[in-house]
Image (cartoon, rainbow, N blue to C red):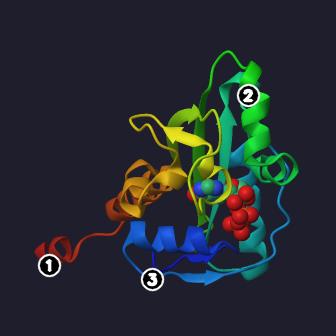
Amino acid sequence: MHRFLFVTHSHNKLSEAERFLDMKLQHYGLDLPELQSVDVEEVAVHKVKYAYNVLQRPVMVDDTGLYVDAWNGLPGGLVKWFMQRVGDRGICDMMQVAKERTARAKTVVATIDDEVNLNIYVGTMEGTIAPEPAGEGGYSWETIFIPNGSDRTVAQMTREEKDHYSMRRVAFEALIRREESMVPSVGALLER
Ligand SMILES: O=P(O)(O)OP(=O)(O)OP(=O)(O)OC[C@H]1O[C@@H](n2cnc3c(O)ncnc32)[C@H](O)[C@@H]1O
């Protein structure tokens, strides 16, 4: 994972990624023209290709969205605009007429390595939209998302609880598995 430059402006993403990968990451706040799409896979692939073209070195990006089933997956990758325009309380108000409250948060981590291979790693967190915002200091939609298995919003959780449910943790664990399967361990090298 050391080989990837993590391209993000988000301190929250960086500190979570470093925790989940258990290492310090090189990072860079490049201004990435973000494709406006519901589909976070599409946005992440667009971002990582752009970052690679500009920086010409192995790069990694994270794109995250919130998918509400009653709205056929909206806002997905457009959640930033929903939060800016209607906010957490506005989303709860709009959900009052919804027949189902189920939703999922999805993180897509995309990498391009030095052989220009592109890979994506997906993590999801299933849950429901809360009847009203709850929790202090939550970031973005964390005040209105209740993960399955909990009765509290992400914003009401301790860091340890949040990490337990985190869609970002699942995505980075998939990256770790892939990297470990590619790099022979020191033990394996000594056996040759
Ligand atoms: O520089 P980049 O990495 O692109 O940072 P960003 O903040 O623009 O990242 P996204 O487009 O992926 O984020 C879309 C929205 O989702 C929010 N978001 C991202 N990760 C989140 C998380 O773990 N919990 C809650 N909200 C999150 C974020 O605040 C944005 O409003």
Residue 152 higher or lower than 70, as above or below: below
The numbered mark, 2 or 1, whose residue comes first in the sequence reads: 2
Mark 1 C-beta closer than 8 Å to ligand 1: no
Does any portion of residue 63 appear in the rendered image?
no
The N terminus: image quadrant? bottom left
Mark 3 C-beta closer than 8 Å to ligand 1: no
Q: Nearer the viewer, residue 22 or 139?
A: 139
The numbered mark, 3 or 1, whose residue comes first in the sequence reads: 3
User: Residue at label 3?
Assistant: 24
Ligand 1 placement by image quarter: bottom right
Image check: 11 left or right of 90?
A: left
Q: Residues within 10 Å of mark 2 (few under 14, many from 20)?
A: some
Q: Residue at x 50, y 42 (%)?
A: 125
Q: Residues within 10 Å of mark 3 (few under 14, many from 20)?
A: few
Does any portion of residue 112 appear in the rendered image?
yes
CA gap, disc 2 and disc 1: 59 Å
Residue 97: x, y in percent?
76, 19
Residue 114 higher or lower than 110, as above or below: below
Image quadrant assignment for residue 53: bottom right
CA gap, disc 3 and disc 2: 40 Å
Residue 104 higher or lower than 48, as above or below: above
Q: Residue at x 44, y 54 (%)?
A: 157
Mark 3 vs mark 1: give the one in front.
3
Instruction: Please tell me whether mark 2 sits on a helix, a strand or a loop.
Output: helix
Name the mark on residue 95: 2
User: Residue at label 1?
Assistant: 190
Image quadrant assignment for residue 110: bottom right
